Image (tube, rainbow, N blue to C red):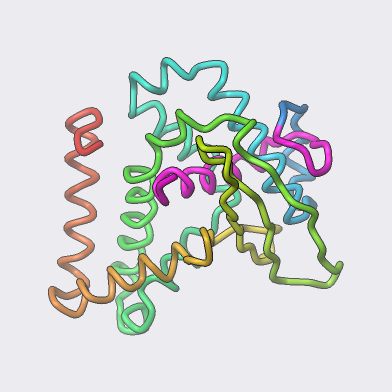
Amino acid sequence: MSKRLVFAVLLGAISAAAAAGTAAADTPAQAGPAPSASNTADLGPREIVQNSAQRMLVELDANRAMYKNDPAKLDSLVANVLLPKFDSEYAAKLVLGLAWRSASEDQRKRFVDAFYHSLLRNYGAALVDFTADRFKILPFRGEPGDTQATVHTEVKRASGEYVPVDFTLHKTDTGWKAWDVVIESISYVKSFRTDIAAEVQAKGLDEVITRLEREQQKRAAGGGAGR
């Protein structure tokens, strides 16, 4: 299984916590009722991953053909459910590293937006092939006062082999939010940061932001070009 597919699990598993339902412990994700928006901030790290996966799977199972045929609708689905429980700004800040410190407010805002849309563009398509029987959450151990957490899961390959996928979350003023996924000991944020750092050094931050924005504009205009 490619990292592209497994990172799609991050989108599906974290994204819909704001409308997620109750889950059975240590079993593959299944559909469940959604809690109200008023109490989602009280969800713990494991509940966010488990319940979010359920919500996304219900929608994909009900409309899989539509999302396969219309990448724009898939992007919209991911965008609508990802933002509440994914800390895009925090992840983007870590990706930029030292360049974040010298970036202007406008550059930071543009990069966060471009970075987020890059995730949608690069990983959204893989969501349509994600099903409940390929995703398992392992027992979670955490303390009430923790502000950082890792939720361990496994994603099943077609061969039957399970791939370890760890979700990294931190506690914010509005509840727990995810910001990274580690696939077989490889961090997505660190990998992306290595690529971006080299490009920023060679071309400058403005050029990198412009490239990301141009790719998004091309995709929007082409109705799925670049998949």
Q: Is residue 101 left or right of residue 127?
A: left
Q: Is residue 65 above or below residue 164?
A: above
Residue 144: % across, % down: 86, 67
Is there any visible trace of residue 180 in the rendered image?
A: no
Q: Is residue 3 left or right of residue 10?
A: left
Residue 29 image-quadrant placement: top right
Q: Which residues are magenta?
A: 1-29
Is there any visible trace of residue 6 in the rendered image?
A: yes
Which residue does the image show at 82% across and 65% down from the upper left? Answer: 142
Residue 72: % across, % down: 33, 29
Residue 193: % across, % down: 36, 71
Q: Is residue 221 above or below residue 38?
A: above
Which residue does the image show at 58% across and 55% down from the upper left? Answer: 165
**The magenta stretch spans residue 40:** no
Which residue does the image show at 19% across and 80% down from the upper left? Answer: 201
Which residue does the image show at 48% across and 47% down from the upper left? Answer: 6
The residue nearer to you, when weighing 205 against 193, is 193
**The magenta stretch spans residue 25:** yes
